[in-house]
Amino acid sequence: MMKKQFRILLAGAMVVVPLGLTVYLVWWAGGGLDNLGRKMLPGWELPPGVGAVILVAAIYLVGLLTHFWIFRAFFHLIEWLFSRLPGIKIIYEAIRDLMKLFGGEAESMGRAVRYKLPGTDVAVLGILTNENPCGQDAEPPDKKVAVYVPFSYMFGGPTIHVSREHVEDLDMSVDQVLKICATAHTGTATIIRKSG
């Protein structure tokens, strides 16, 4: 009897917890955006939510300006300056690459691969990010490629340099690999290998 009640409770939690956390995170992010937007107009008494609208409108305006060559050149100059400053360069490039990833440019990171650990039957999903990584031998047999291996249930993961012969291309998008890795392959479709 208790087991049945516990299963009912667990079924309810499976619905309520993801929905509740999602609503909370969206509410929290919206509050953060609202506060940032309000700081753009100090001294103004704004109704709740208007700050977020102002911030989104400002970001949209910057996006429009990037379509004009004179502003594009200005933004490239700022980007060039940020990418030359020690310390700031690392932060800026990491955030920029993360934004590209979530902005639909995941394929620019590389391509979906499976890395097979030599001498074992273990394989991990990854993203081949560079065929000729800096600091590695460019000629066989010591030639290595860079493979990013995302961690499950969190951001981050190691970038490993491995022999190309142990890397197999997959008929999957980078987005699919990131989703599968992020959720530890729960509730996802079977991997389809490229033929040939």
Image: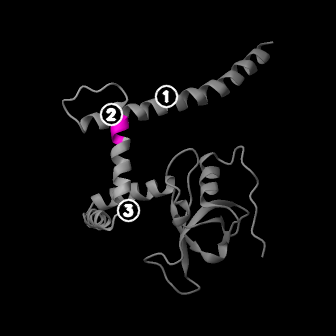
Indicate which label's residue lies in the foreground, 2 or 1: 2
Residue at position x 55%, y 74% from top? 145
Distance from Cα at disc 2 to Cα at disc 1: 19 Å
Who's the residue at 38% across and 31% down the image?
31
Q: Position of residue 196 (x, y in %)?
A: 78, 76
Q: Nearer the viewer, residue 70 or 159?
A: 70
Residue 152 x/y as whole percent: 59, 48
Magenta stretch bounds: 51-55
> Secondary structure beneath disc 1?
helix
Label located before the other in sequence (3 or 2): 2
Q: Earlier in the sequence, mark 2 or mark 1?
A: 1
* Coordinates of residue 105 in the picture (x, y in percent): 51, 60
Q: Give the residue type that dot 2 points to.
A: Gly
Which tag is nearer the camera, tag 3 or tag 2? 3
Identify the main secondary structure in magenta.
helix
Q: Quadrant of residue 2?
A: top right
What is the number of the mark on residue 24?
1
Q: Amino acid at mark 1?
A: Tyr
Q: Answer whether labels 3 and 2 touch (C-beta < 8 Å).
A: no
Q: Is residue 188 left or right of residue 174?
A: right
The amino acid type, in three-letter code, at marker 3 is His
**Which residue is the site of mark 3?**
67
